[in-house]
Image: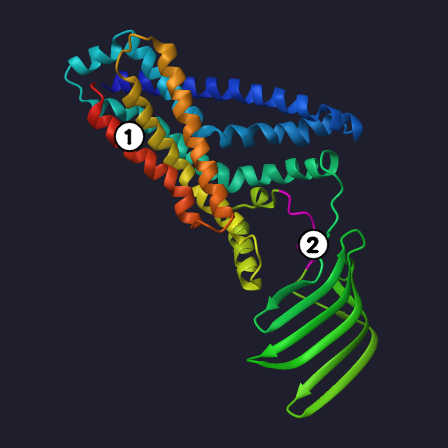
Amino acid sequence: MKLLDGYILKRFLQTYLFVVIVIVLVVVMIDYTEKVDNFHKTNAPAGEILWNYYLNFIPYWANYISPLMVFIATVFLTSRLAARTEIIAILSSGVSFVRLLFPYVLGASVLAVLTYFMVNYIIPKANKTRIAFEIKYINEAYTYSHRNVHIKIAPNVYAYLESYNNLSNTGYKFTLERIEGNLLKQKLTADRIEWDAKKKKWGVYDYTIRTINGQEELLTPGTRIDTTLHLKPDDFSSDFHLYETLTRPELNQRIDILRSRGSDGVETYLLEKYSRDTRPFAILILTVIGVIMSARKSRRGVGWQVALGFFLAFTYLLFFMLAKGIAESGNLNPVLAVWLPNLIFTLIGVFLYNTIPR
């Protein structure tokens, strides 16, 4: 059986690699066709298109479709083995169906572990370069348009900005309040604040500091003061697919910051975090389902089984995207949203195992 394990494992990984290469090449061609006008319009250098964009675009998509491609590869390989009656011969020799799953599960486990490290540590670094290219050459210039911004920057400190110009890194009508319990202890108001890139500090202009101590108040006016705040220009920059550029530690840090500030949009980062955990399990689940549904020789041929595999694979993707969209709107728990497709397809796998003759 060890020789057979090696044979199936080798064919499984080869088929997976072939399917991923084919699909990714198709995606690249479609993407280039859609974006070629933007490349010409913005005069994007060919070297940057190739090295900064597509060199990082390919691993992103290869990883993104990995669970589906594992499923397609499993169905394609197993249905071919079944069509040549190799599966029947293996089972007739006394090998159990569970034992037959071993090389598939082994190969899927290797891909699952690789996917986990890729999606948490490697792909985000590649996405930093890719998304920076998109912001520069594909998307329109970003302008921070939010007004009346309230941000909690420390346990008892709250900042307010009427508006912010991300091109000059200048905020207008700035207020900084220190509140202890229900009491206002200190309040700074200023006409504007500007980021000093050399000092890595904010310059506060035309300010007044109001300090309250019981029944006493002290007003301290000034024309300029430099201060360090738990606030950076990056907090007002484009957050276009920012969650895709964060490694696991950076993603956790971002979630903590958003929670401490009480900001909106934390669900997006939670979904990204939890979905990275579910991807390896999706590979294992879809692999087992693929073997179960294609191990039986079909009179309709291999093409029918592969087509059915594509249908189930994209059904899984559609279900995942639907649950994720509902969770982003705040109507579904993020953990449940990302695990629900895996739980449902696990039940489908158990049903198929108990009903389909093998």
How many C-alpha atoms fall within 10 Å of the one at disc 2: few (<14), some, or many (≥20)? some
Q: Is residue 335 above or below residue 33?
A: below
| Residue at the image point whose x is 73% and y is 75% from the top | 188
Q: Residue furthest bottom?
A: 215
Count of number-bearing discs: 2
Looking at the image, residue 16 sits to the left or right of residue 256; the answer is left
Residue 284 lies in quadrant: top left
Q: What amino acid type is highlighted by mark number 2?
A: Phe
Where residue 152 sits: x, y (%)? 61, 66
Q: Is residue 268 above or below residue 43?
A: below
| Residue at the image point whose x is 72% and y is 64% from the top | 161
Whether 235 is among the magenta residues is yes
Specify start and end residues of the magenta stretch as a single range. 232-240
Where residue 238 sits: x, y (%)? 68, 47
Secondary structure beneath label 2: helix
Where residue 358 sits: x, y (%)? 21, 18
Looking at the image, residue 120 sits to the left or right of residue 226; the answer is left
Looking at the image, residue 175 sits to the left or right of residue 60; the answer is right
| Residue at the image point whose x is 67% and y is 32% from the top | 52
How many C-alpha atoms fall within 10 Å of the one at disc 1: few (<14), some, or many (≥20)? many
Q: Is residue 67 above or below residue 154?
A: above
Whether 123 is among the magenta residues is no
- The residue indicated by pointer 1 is 349
Q: Is disc 2 in contact with disc 1, using a CB cutoff of under 8 Å?
A: no
Where residue 236 is drawn, which disc sits there?
Answer: 2
Q: Is residue 44 above or below residue 256?
A: above
**Does any portion of residue 69 appear in the rendered image?**
yes
Q: Nearer the viewer, residue 30 or 129?
A: 30
Q: Nearer the viewer, residue 327 or 9?
A: 327
